[in-house]
Amino acid sequence: MAPRTAPRRARRFWLALLVALSCGSFSQAACAVDKAKVAEGMAVQAGKAFEGGDYARAADLYLNAYRTDANSAFLYGAARSQHLAGRLDQANELYQQFLTAANADPERQKRAREYLAEIERSKAVALAADAEKAQRDDPKLAASLYQDAYKLAPMRPDLLFRAAVAEQQAGDLTAAQKDFEVYLAKAQANAPERTQAQARLESIRRKLNPQVTPELVAPPELKAPVEPKPEAKPVAPPETKSVVQPDLPRPPIGVEAPAVAPSRWPGWAMVGLGGALAVGGLVVYLGAASANSQLQQDLTVTNDAGQISGLTHEEAQSRAAAINTRMGVAAGLAGAGVAAAGVGTWLLVRTPARAAVVVPQPGGALLVWRF
């Protein structure tokens, strides 16, 4: 048996060697076809995972297919899968690589640029949310996050406005002034933050550049020339005779009347009215402040294109006007309440009339009030 086994093994060895040499020397094109088929098979599996919503597995399969066969279509599929899987950094890198890939489809390149812009907006929204959370405790960090978000989404100047507000809260008035000025230069004329930005900017400018405004002296009025009147002859005043009061038999007697305390109910009524007006103003103000906070939240809700989707422009303007009106009513009620309370307090604390004195006179009596 041994003599027969050895020749068989030898024949198998030489046959395997011949096949290997044939694969290496016959044609490299045949091996390339095999790689393309393998990559295509992985791409088919990746497409099924993509349609099933398993974007992470689809991304891995597309990447393996691209490593096997450098087909730009596989690279695009991997980038899109990473994007939908929420891996924005990896998707950004693969989109950039696809844009420079050889023989890339122009239509897919156009979509890749749109997806890159979408990723930038998504990152900007995430940074803005983090900045809003940090603004109360660390306004300086919030300003930095808003700045980063604005760099990613320069089409949203409202992020620059929020950065300026945070810088103002942090005490960096110079940076806040600069960002408010840039915001006003780039924001639309009907942007809801323009009025507040202008008011804040003027306040910062007054603090950074205090100036004493000289009093304006009005020019003297030009009066028409007055014709001189003829001199009137001096008239001698009539002679006055001194009236001699007869001596009184006794000194005048002063009779002091008791002090009369004024009624206190008008004062309490005015104080109560002032308090009611002030409370009413506070209630109106809190309602307006809550409505304003809700409006600001609605303005931050954006779609994939970075546009506000929570409400229309007309609705935002209408709500902002209503909020401003309610703020004005609140201020008016509060001012009226303070005034009424002040009057009531004065009525309560005023000093009553102290006394009256009757002084006898030769021709009658003289009544004198003392306060």
Image: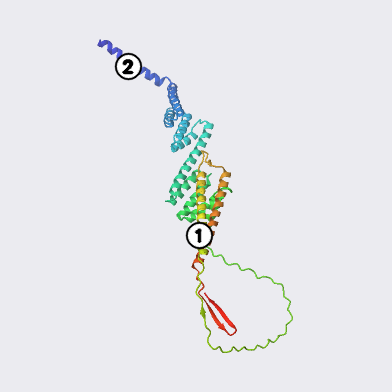
Position of 231 compared to 213: left or right?
right
| Residue occupying image coordinates x 32% and y 14% | 11
Residue 191, compared with residue 14, is above or below; it is below
| Nearer the observer, 292 or 54 | 292
SS class of the residue under badge 1?
Answer: helix
SS class of the residue under badge 2?
Answer: helix
| Nearer the observer, 285 or 70 | 285
Residue 249, compared with residue 191, is above or below; it is below
Q: Nearer the viewer, mark 1 or mark 2?
A: 1
Residue 119, compared with residue 263, is above or below; it is above
Residue carrying label 2: 13
Residue type marked 1: Gly
Is residue 160 visible to us here? no
Is residue 144 visible to us here? yes
Position of 199 compared to 137: left or right?
right
| Nearer the observer, 263 or 52 | 263
Position of 211 compared to 235: left or right?
left
| Res 314 label | none
Q: Who comes first in sequence, dot 1 or dot 2?
A: 2
| Res 272 label | 1
Q: Position of residue 360 (x, y in %)?
A: 55, 83
Neighbour tally class for label 1: few under 14, some 14-19, many 20 plus, Cα within 10 Å? some
C-alpha span from label 1 to label 2: 112 Å
Q: Position of residue 120 (x, y in %)?
A: 49, 40
| Nearer the observer, 236 or 309 | 236
Q: Position of residue 268 (x, y in %)?
A: 50, 62
Neighbour tally class for label 2: few under 14, some 14-19, many 20 plus, Cα within 10 Å? few
Number of disc labels: 2
Q: Position of residue 34 (x, y in %)?
A: 43, 22
Do the residues bearing badges 1 and 2 touch, measured as CB atoms within 8 Å? no
Residue type marked 2: Phe
Q: Quadrant of the N terminus?
A: top left
